[in-house]
Amino acid sequence: MIKWARAIGCPWDESTCSWAALAGHLEILKWARADGCPWDENTCSRAARCGHLEVLKWARENGCPWDTERTCEYAAIGGHLEILKWAREKECPWDEQTCQAGARNGNLDFLKWAHDNGCEWDEWTCAYAAEKCHLEVLKWLHAKGCPWDEDTCEYAARNGHLELLKWAHANVCPWGAWACSSATREGHLEILKWAHVNGCPWPEHTCGDAAVFGHLEILK
């Protein structure tokens, strides 16, 4: 079909190659490039995201750029450790977003390898683990010295993860009014009760939030 479309003048751009890479269609990618189709770093990042190592290898061998950290980040989003290892062997850049994505996916083996090999992390790494209720990941991150801030408790409260919130608070994770505010807006009454009893501050607009988001039980 793509040959026919091109034969009658259908335009293409860099996205053609990146979508072929995303779907793992190496033969289409090869044909498109041979016919002059442009590409950019999205070809590599999308191949990495979907686990298409052979596509990624061919793209790099044929000069496709990956001059951003997105390729490693997307490998993490997809949970493709072998792709990450290969990319790093080839000196693909990475940054803290690789660990953030690994934490959000709950992929502890991925995180361990990335950390052991020098990948940076930051407070968002813990926050994203909390967002998706990956308690074991959060415990490991904290034990390894990954920093956290109020966003960890806020993300736990927003998404209804009471046990994770309890653990974080017991381990002296900071919290602020946004934890109660987010619990209110999402209708998590039990979390709001527990947080308030345990000293979490709540903003003056808590009742207003309950009203505007339709949470009568919280307002009562």
Image (cartoon, helix red, strand yellow):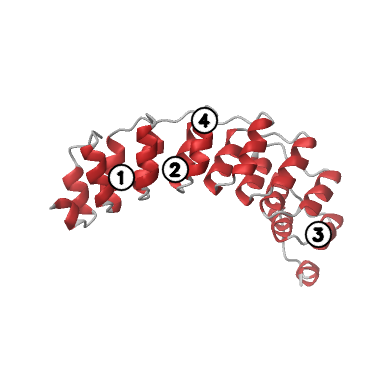
Examine the rendering and report whether any part of residue 71 can be seen: yes
Of 16 and 140, nearer the camera is 140
**Residue assigned mark 4:** 143
Identify the secondary structure beneath mark 3.
helix
Q: Amino acid at mark 4?
A: Ala
Query: Going by the image, does 105 lie left or right of 74?
Result: left
Q: How many marks?
A: 4
Q: Amino acid at mark 3?
A: Leu
Crowding at dot 3, Cα within 10 Å, few <14 / some 14-19 / many 20+, comes out as many
The picture places residue 85, in percent across and down from the top left corner, at 74, 40
| Residue 182: mark in rendering | 1
Q: Is residue 70 above or below residue 116?
A: below
Disc 3 from disc 4: Cα separation: 42 Å
Query: How many other residues sit within 10 Å of disc 1, few (<14), some (14-19) or many (≥20)?
Result: many
Q: CA distance from mark 4 to mark 2?
A: 15 Å
Q: Nearer the viewer, residue 179 or 165?
A: 165
Q: Is residue 10 left or right of residue 99?
A: right
**Among numbered discs 3 and 1, the one appearing first in the sequence:** 3
> Residue under circle 2?
130
Q: Position of residue 118 (x, y in %)?
A: 66, 28
